[in-house]
Image (cartoon, rainbow, N blue to C red):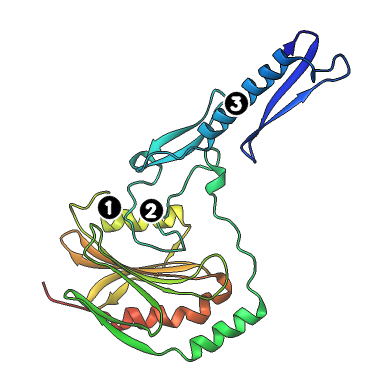
Amino acid sequence: MIYGESPLILYFDMEKASPRIAVDDATTACSGNARQMRLIAAAAAFLTLAGRAWCADCPRGSTRMVTDDPLEPFRCVPDEELPDAGKPYFPKMGSFKSLPVAPKLRPSLEPSVAAPLPARTKRAGAHAAQALKYERYQISELSFDYPRGWSMTDGWDDELPTLYIQHDTGAQGRQVVLTISRAQIGQYGYLDLDTAVAKERRWQKAREGQRGRAAGLPARFTMVSGQSRSAYLDAGEGRYYILSYSAPEALFETFEPAFDRMLSSLRLARP
């Protein structure tokens, strides 16, 4: 911007969400020019408001998506329109609503690479796994064993019934997590079992193992090496259960027996 003979440079610091102003004093001094100082103050106020608009959160039920349009740097997109909005929700791998996002649109949401766990944490994890004690958890529909002392969140009465079990390792980043959920026709975003497994293979790059049985039901098993395991139990008529396990790579094998115990001890009530 040019005011009189003085180049006035206004720009916005996107990282600090605050305006910055530069005046070229080589041609003129603005300290004694009240009109120019008012102009600077007005421009700073405008940029502050613009920064607040940029940093504003989207309404609940929508997600901010980066665009290539400089006049509209982002837009609020309803969650149901996101690329993987139809995937059944069952917590895993930390966040747990695993929504693959096109990297060109939203690179900030790409999974971050966690720092390696210190040797002290690895030793503590191995010791904890050797000392695992189990207790029985039971609701009207099912029962199973899980490690004593792990945090249990019971959301079985939610629209998508889910039990979320976490072991806090004390380290930052991804924690050790076990989940059980149930999918059935009529739920929002429901996918049949074949489609759900196919989407996990495509989005998570999971490998499917040999089919078998668990809790008396036909079962399909998937795995992302060193990251997660899942079991899909077909209860018939479009209804199925999903058991999953995720952990930091350094602790994945250490606590994997907890998932095996949960799966082998699972008992379902007859409908």
Question: What is the residue that sits farthest to the right in this orientation?
Answer: 26
CB atoms of marks 2 and 1 within 8 Å:
yes
Q: Position of residue 45 (x, y in %)?
A: 60, 26
Residue 262 image-quadrant placement: bottom left
For the residue pair 79 and 12, the one nearer the viewer reads as 12
Percent coordinates x, y for residue 55 in the rendering:
53, 38
Disc 1 crowd, CA 10 A, few/some/many (<14, 14-19, 20+): many
Distance between the alpha carbons at the discs numbered 2 and 1: 10 Å
- Please identify, in this view, whether the residue under mark 2 or under mark 3 is nearer the observer: 3
Query: Which residue is painted at 60% across and 80% down in the image?
Result: 122
Q: Say which residue label 3 marks.
A: 45
Q: Within the image, what quadrant is residue 90 found in?
A: bottom left
Q: Measuring from the top left, give residue 9's x and y in whole percent.
A: 74, 21
Above or below 228: residue 213: below
Query: The residue under label 3 is which amino acid type?
Result: Ala
Looking at numbered disc 2 in the image, what kind of residue is underneath it? Answer: Lys
Helix, strand or loop for disc 3? helix
Amino acid bearing label 1: Leu
User: On the rendered image, what quadrant is the C terminus found in?
Assistant: bottom left
Residue beneath label 2, please? Answer: 199
Number of other residues with Cα within 10 Å of mark 2, as a class: few under 14, some 14 to 19, many 20 or more: some
In the rendered structure, the answer to whether residue 115 lies left or right of residue 162 reads right
> Can you see residue 1?
no
**Pointer 1 residue:** 191
Residue 159 in percent (x, y) is at 23, 57
Looking at marks 3 and 1 on the same chain, the residue that comes earlier in the sequence is marked by: 3
* Residue that appears at 87% across and 14% down: 27
Q: Residue at x 56, y 44 (%)?
A: 107
Foreground disc of the pair 3, 1: 3
| CA separation in Å, label 3 and label 1 | 50 Å
Instruction: Determine which quarter of the picture holds residue 166.
Output: bottom left
Residue 2 seen by the camera = yes
